[in-house]
Image (cartoon, coloured by chain):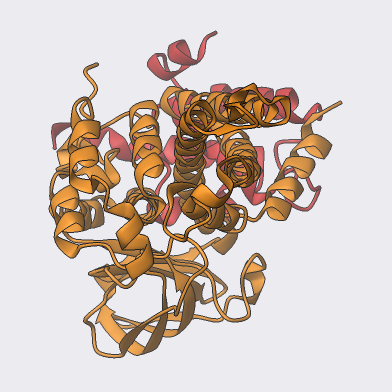
Amino acid sequence: MADPLAGQRDLVSALVGDQADKWDLAGELPEELLRQLGAAGLLCAQVPAAHGGLGASSAANGEFTAHVGSLCSSLRSVMTSQGMAAWTIQRLGDADQQRAWLPRLTSGQLAAVGFSEPAAGSDLSAMDTRISLEGDTVVVSGQKVWVTAAHYADLLVVFGRCGDGGAAVVVPATAPGVLVERVADPMGCRAAGHANVRLDAVRLPATHLLGGVGQSLPLLVTAALAYGRFSVAWGCVGILRACLRASAEHARSRQQFGTPLGQHQLIARHLADLLVAEQVATRACEHASHCWDAGSPDVVIATVLAKHVSAGHAARGAASAVQVLASAGARDGHVVARAYRDAKLMEIIEGSNEICQLILSQHVLTTVR
Amino acid sequence: MTIEQTAASAVTAETVASTVLGFLVERTRTTPEVDQDLFASGVVSSMFAMELIVHLEKSFGVSIVGGDLKLDNFRSVRSMTALVLRLRGDSAPAADG
């Protein structure tokens, strides 16, 4: 099958150019860039053609995500949010809802997904946002924090408690009772538009409630996060590729003690470690994408493993890259300085290192005999 | 019987139950009774339920989406069998649409 994303990497490279540093320092992505990429279907490239999407495979979208991640993790984070919103609607919505919402996400509207709350991060059982049905109206009340891309979003996919179970609702950002407030000065992915969202008795048609009532909240969140983890994992591959490139160029050109840095063995080891990190993360992500595309049940654990491996390698790799570039990379906004801050956040979002380890260890206890 | 053959040939409660049981045995090395509560016995977490969902979709050509993402649907071999048979029944009349 032809890769619908062939050629699109050059387009994104041209659109981003050398501006990622500036966007990081300003904490803002140009809205017209997001609209343009969104209208081309590139922010959620796996949406099927039947819903206006590009119908990309996980493998193709993964490589594309890594490319965007190598240029600008803030932009890649917006992609992750848009793709996760689309995937959530695909997984949780019925056929009518998919027809209603997915074409919007491939035609320029932007979306974000709200999980975390002031008292509920990894512990979903503490989630306090209430979703209730009143006749043909759904009412949403609660508070979401650190919603990536919510600053730019037209649509917010909000998870919450609903009766004895859980549910997700598509909330237009302009609906009465919705208040979106930017997180001030995020440490990483500074231009990704992280925001806190207050929902004060927001009333919407019941058709905005994805799938209906009585669903399992942990299962819904697990299903939605599958895409987010996959996307973050490939984004971390991009971070590593950017760090590898910057480190190699610097180690070739910078001279100290009369030889290029790369000829100093302690620096050379950083380069080897960065290559190993980039290759290991890539292989883990390729495996997860292969499982996704093949419909293999192994995709569930492979995706968690890829996210964990890639985020850890990206955080350590970015620290090595800053070490190699030293003062040349120690300016905020520089590609390795951004990588250092952005990668650290990747060890936290979409399942922290520790949550990933708990999931993987539970898998060991259940399946390994 | 391969997965593709299962999807193409007649699907009965027996074939669904045996496919699900086969998956559970392969993954967990335990053989539950068809009515055994897999959550109560600690076999199934929400992560493993996702594996079951992907397995059932691939094996039987169904989509488990929307309101069917209830843990009760994955609580036992019998409930998963009923879910698959219902979804395959649902999809038949929709073939002209």
Residue closer to the observer: B62 or A127: A127
For this orientation, the residue located farthest to the top is: B1
Percent across and percent down for residue B26 are 72, 22
> For this view, does A161 lie left or right of residue B45?
left
Up-down relation of residue A219 to residue B62 (above or below): below
Label the red chain with its letter. Answer: B
For the point 73% across and 30% down, which residue is it? A266
For the point 22% across and 69% down, which residue is it? A154
Percent across and percent down for residue A43 are 27, 47
Rendering colour (chain A): orange
For the point 74% across and 25% down, which residue is it? B25
Up-down relation of residue A98 to residue A256 (above or below): below
Residue closer to the observer: A153 or A190: A190
Percent across and percent down for residue A161 are 52, 75
Residue A27 visible? The answer is no
Q: Quadrant of residue A301?
A: top right
Q: Quadrant of residue A46?
A: top left
Up-down relation of residue A92 to residue B2 (above or below): below
